[in-house]
Image (cartoon, helix red, strand yellow):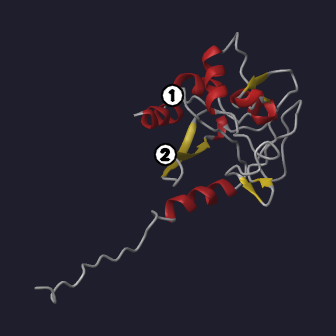
Amino acid sequence: MKLQELLKDLCKNHYLGKVATYIYVIEFQKRGLPHAHILLIFSQDSKLHSVKDYDSIISAELSDLAVYPLAYETVTSTMMHSLCGVLNPLAPCMKNGLCQKHYLKSFQSTTQKNSDGYPIYRKRDNGSFVEVRSGICLDNRWVIPHNVELVTKYDAHINIEICNSVLAIKYLYKYVYKGYDQATIALSQPDNSNEP
């Protein structure tokens, strides 16, 4: 029900802009619950052209507790990248000693466009942090990009990224066509014909 409501908010209520077309797929990960990958293609008058446009719909920082208390609770509980790197070298995201999601990000005073089509989101060093287990404090460098309005409404992990590249389409079509996990199982019954 949440997914259908989210699609309605995105595609009919235009929470992020007027959507020309969209596609989504449900992924069933082995280590987690099913989740949706959604690709939105905005109409020409809603396309994002500047970093100001990016910042108007995406935040990669802790929400202000005084202004957005519900978003703050959701961001601190569901939108923080899990401990990895030197803090947890055995984290699932680690491969060959590096985080595959490129965390811990650097502080960034402004959002910047990047040559690969994905922006580098603003992550200011403003003293904001949340304390997690064992007294470890996570700041804006650990926040996963999101939309404040959507995480407030849905109280759920909703990662939002901007991609001005054909790579996003290729990425999602991979999910459409890869099919479900499959296994071959052989069942046999012991031959008891020799028993009396």
Query: Label 1: how many residues lie within 10 Å, few (<14), some (14-19) or many (20+)?
Result: few
Residue 80 drawn at (x, y percent): 69, 34
Q: Nearer the viewer, residue 96 or 66?
A: 96
Q: Amino acid at mark 1?
A: Asn
Residue 105 drawn at (x, y percent): 83, 41
Q: Is residue 96 left or right of residue 155?
A: right
Secondary structure type for disc 1: loop
Residue 102 drawn at (x, y percent): 79, 48
For the question of whether residue 59 can be seen, the reply is no
- For this orientation, the residue located farthest to the bottom is 194
Q: Which residue is mark 1?
A: 13
**Quadrant housing the C terminus:** bottom left
Q: Amino acid at mark 2?
A: Leu
Q: Which residue is mark 2?
A: 33
190 relative to 49, above or below: below
Q: Nearer the viewer, residue 189 or 157?
A: 189
Residue drawn at x 51%, y 65% as measured from the top left: 178
113 relative to 97, above or below: above
Task: Tell me the quarter of the picture where residue 186 sits.
Answer: bottom left
- For this orientation, the residue located farthest to the top is 66
